[in-house]
Amino acid sequence: MTATRTAGNTPARAARRGVLLQLVRPVARTVPWWALAAGGGLGLLAAALPRLSGGEVTPWAGVNALRAAALCFALGAAFLLDDPARQTTAAVPVRRVLRHALRCALVLPAAAVWWSAAVLLVPEEARPPAGDVTLEAATALAL
């Protein structure tokens, strides 16, 4: 009797998963953490400017502060696309796209924490409204 395999659990996929797990540490060392920290710090400062200004803050100023913060973080995150180790990792059995995706996946939790901090630094009366997401609103956004 022969056993059938499911499409999601092939030996090639398991081998690829093992290679990815082995690549996490070397790829994490090549992430430009200094650029992310510099862009993130500058972005947090931009998000805190309405709070630090001392006067009354309008929602328009809060939105612009969050836009400036996102731009600063994006400038720091742009260095993720430059892989200084691309010459030394040419013999790795995975493609460059997969290595770049792994670099972005390593930064994603830090980016989520950073964005939460940036939104919380903007004064509450100046934060853009999140609003209630209803089924009608979600379908309107999907279209």
Image: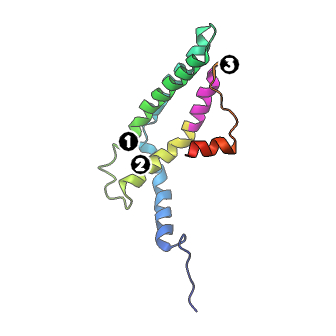
- Magenta part of the chain: 112-124
Q: Which label sits on residue 105?
A: none
Badge number at residue 125 = 3
Q: Nearer the viewer, residue 97 or 19?
A: 97
Circle 3 residues within 10 Å: few <14, some 14–19, many ≥20: few
User: In this rendering, would 91 be left or right of 130?
Assistant: left
Side of 133 relative to 140 (left or right): right
Residue 16 point in image, percent of width and height: 46, 64
| Residue lying at 51% horizontally and 45% vertically, measured from the top left | 106
Q: Which mark is residue 81?
A: 1
Q: In this view, does 23 lie to the left or right of 133?
A: left
Q: Which amino acid does label 1 sit on?
A: Leu
Judge depth for marks 1 and 3 and give the one in front. Answer: 3
Query: What SS does tag 3 mark?
Result: helix
User: At label 3, which amino acid type do we have?
Assistant: Glu
Callout 1–callout 2 Cβ contact below 8 Å: yes
Name the residue that disc number 2 marks: 100
Looking at the image, residue 5 lies above or below residue 86: below
Q: Are marks 1 and 3 in contact (CB under 8 Å)?
A: no
**3 or 2: tag closer to the N-terminus:** 2
User: Residue 85, position in %: x, y?
Assistant: 34, 46
